Image: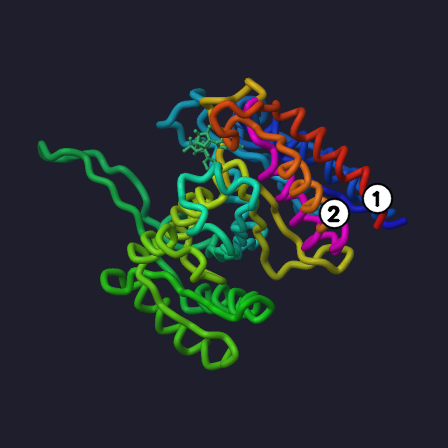
Amino acid sequence: METYTIAVLAGDGIGPEVTTEAARVLEAAVKQAGRTVALREALVGQAAIEREGAAISEETMALCQRSDAVLFGAVGGAGVGNPNSKQQPEQALFRLRKDLELFANLRPVRPYPALVGASTLKRSVLSGVDLVVVRELTGGLYYGKPSEIRDGVDGKGASAVDTMAYTEEEIERIVRYAYTLAQGRRKRLTSVDKANVLSCSRLWRRVVDRVSADYPDVETRHLLVDSCAMALIRSPRDFDVIVTENMFGDILTDEASMLTGSMGMLPSASLGLRKTAHGHQFGLYEPIHGTAPDITGQGKANPLAAILSAALLLRYSLGLQRAAGAVERAVRQVIAQGYRTPDIARPGEQVVSTREMGAAVLGALTASKKE
Ligand code: NAD
């Protein structure tokens, strides 16, 4: 029987709460598909800094390297740690993305009809929205050097510098990824940049124009990031695949999460070109939200983004399409049945805890047919 190895890095804040539920659902879905999975837990983020001296240890990196996939929670400031320290929890994610060459971050956004009322946007704006943001993940402002705060000299105040840099190759591989994805969808690609101001964006646009000739079946449009931020709220149905650089993608997907009503609903897959021992795509899967220090340890976190991330893991890294579909159906079912964590509940609606929501999905999954 085929056995998969998954590194489970729950991290900080609500990371462990939501990842526990996602890991349970993942295990059950793999079992239903007649396979076995070994879940290997390791520390990451602030927890790892405190216990192992680094945001991610060499052992944990090695575990990830030999796994089929990484199921990740969230890392970062739960009001602990020193913001001036050289050891920051987020370094774990940056290292994982860079060392594992996970350059493509896919963030599907499809509001659930039963949850339309949880969004601040009108039902008429949300119906029919089905888009994917493809965010470049290993370049741009988050990796460029120099990036530092410089002490002031000669009586001048301190200064700071960050660097945005992209190579043509980095842009081309993510753009091709997005085009291929668009070919399997509604064949509309929106490339988002800030070409009126940034050199990186002008190169980005030049590469998109060149590469677009290889995908004549896909309609291409360019949009400035500020304009895109507006259009995402005004007419989100107009989008199919959005491709953009690292920081723009980071910001736009938080905005897009509001189309689904909550940060707690949006999963993501980080992929590259690396194959697993079983011949599938290696990847890292995580909810798009952070550690949510304001609700940590209260059983209020919505585990659905983490569970939906596990569904993406089943699809891309284990090749278990039907198991992935079964998890997504189980999530749809519990939402339709009215299960609501506080973030997606309307005033007066009864709410369930993180654990109860996880158990409801598990129940719906195990009640469904075997793959
Ligand atoms: P956040 O995503 O943690 O929280 C934003 C808001 O959304 C909060 O009100 C929070 O309660 C709510 N929220 C988030 N996830 C939720 C869930 N599953 N269920 C219900 N409500 C949810 O963003 P933030 O507050 O800006 O950041 C907190 C920390 O997380 C920071 O240290 C940040 O660096 C870190 N962070 C980490 C990641 C990651 O690990 N990938 C991503 C984003 C932020």
Task: Check residue 326 in the rendering and tell me which mark sits there, or answer none.
Answer: 2
Mark 1 or 2: in front is 2
Q: Earlier in the sequence, mark 1 or mark 2?
A: 1
The answer to whether any part of residue 14 appears in the image is no
Q: Is residue 235 visible?
A: yes
Q: CA distance from mark 1 to mark 2?
A: 10 Å
Residue 310, horizontal then vertical, whole percent = 67, 43
- Magenta part of the chain: 300-324
Q: Position of residue 131 (x, y in %)?
A: 50, 57
Residue beneath the point at 43% across and 43% down: 254
Q: Identify the residue at image location x=46%, y=81%.
A: 213
310 is within the stretch colored magenta: yes
Q: Do callouts 1 and 2 mark residues in contact (Cβ within 8 Å)?
A: yes
Q: Amino acid at mark 1?
A: Gln
Kindly identify which residue carries mark 1: 32
Residue 353: x %, y % from top left: 61, 23
Q: Nearer the viewer, residue 335 or 301?
A: 335
- In terms of image quadrants, where is residue 277? bottom right
Provide the secondary structure element on which disc 1 rests.
helix
Q: Residue at x 38, y 70 (%)?
A: 221
Q: In the displayed structure, would residue 147 be above or below residue 299?
A: below
In this rendered view, identify the residue nearer to me: 159 or 304: 304
Q: Is 272 situated above or below 185?
A: above
Q: Secondary structure at mark 2?
A: helix
Q: Is residue 186 left or right of residue 364?
A: left
**Residue at the image position 70 percent from the left and 35 percent from the top:** 361
Q: Is residue 78 above or below residue 55?
A: above
Q: List x then y, in percent, for residue 289.
A: 49, 37
Q: Is residue 313 left or right of residue 343?
A: right
